[in-house]
């Protein structure tokens, strides 16, 4: 069953919130973020700059040698992104 736009926004927010709260995550979560961002770029009213920042965060995290450190170093951005995405959910 495909996710509708609201489901995608909710999932995006959930993953970002988990990274912010837990200071850890997985490559598969980052890959999911990338897929969500690509889908939302095509048909949502989320700020395209925020989506691009999340996309870059995902790509850099996937390539990172220390994923937890990558997530920890983005705590401020994660908090802001959760707030930005929350405005649309």
Image: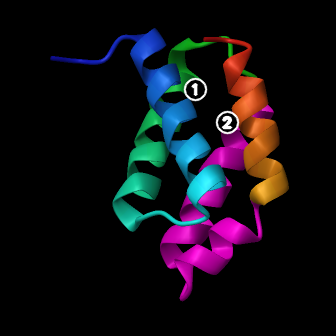
Which region is colored magenta? 49-74
Nearer the camera: disc 1 or disc 2: 2
Q: Name the quarter where the N terminus is drawn.
A: top left
Residue that mark 1 sits on: 41
The answer to whether residue 76 is left or right of residue 54 is: right
Where's residue 30, x and y in %? 46, 56
Which label number is shown at residue 51? 2
Q: Nearer the viewer, residue 66 or 4?
A: 66
Judged from the image, the secondary structure of the residue bearing numbered disc 2 is helix
Instruction: Write the residue at 66% across / 73% down.
Output: 70
Q: Is residue 54 magenta?
A: yes
The answer to whether residue 46 is left or right of residue 14 is: right
Q: Does the magenta stretch include residue 4?
A: no
Q: How many labels does the image show?
A: 2
The answer to whether residue 35 is left or right of residue 52 is: left
Could you give the CA–CA distance between mark 1 and mark 2, rounded to whole angstroms?
7 Å
């Amino acid at each position: 069953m495909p996710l509708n736009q609201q489901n995608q926004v909710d999932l995006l927010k959930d993953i970002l919130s988990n990274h912010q709260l837990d200071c850890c995550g997985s490559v598969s979560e980052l890959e999911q973020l990338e897929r969500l961002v690509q889908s939302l770029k095509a048909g949502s009213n989320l700020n395209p700059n925020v989506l691009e920042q999340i996309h870059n965060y995902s790509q850099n995290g996937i390539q990172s040698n220390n994923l937890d450190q990558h997530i920890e170093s983005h705590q401020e951005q994660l908090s802001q992104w959760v707030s930005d995405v929350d405005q649309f959910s």
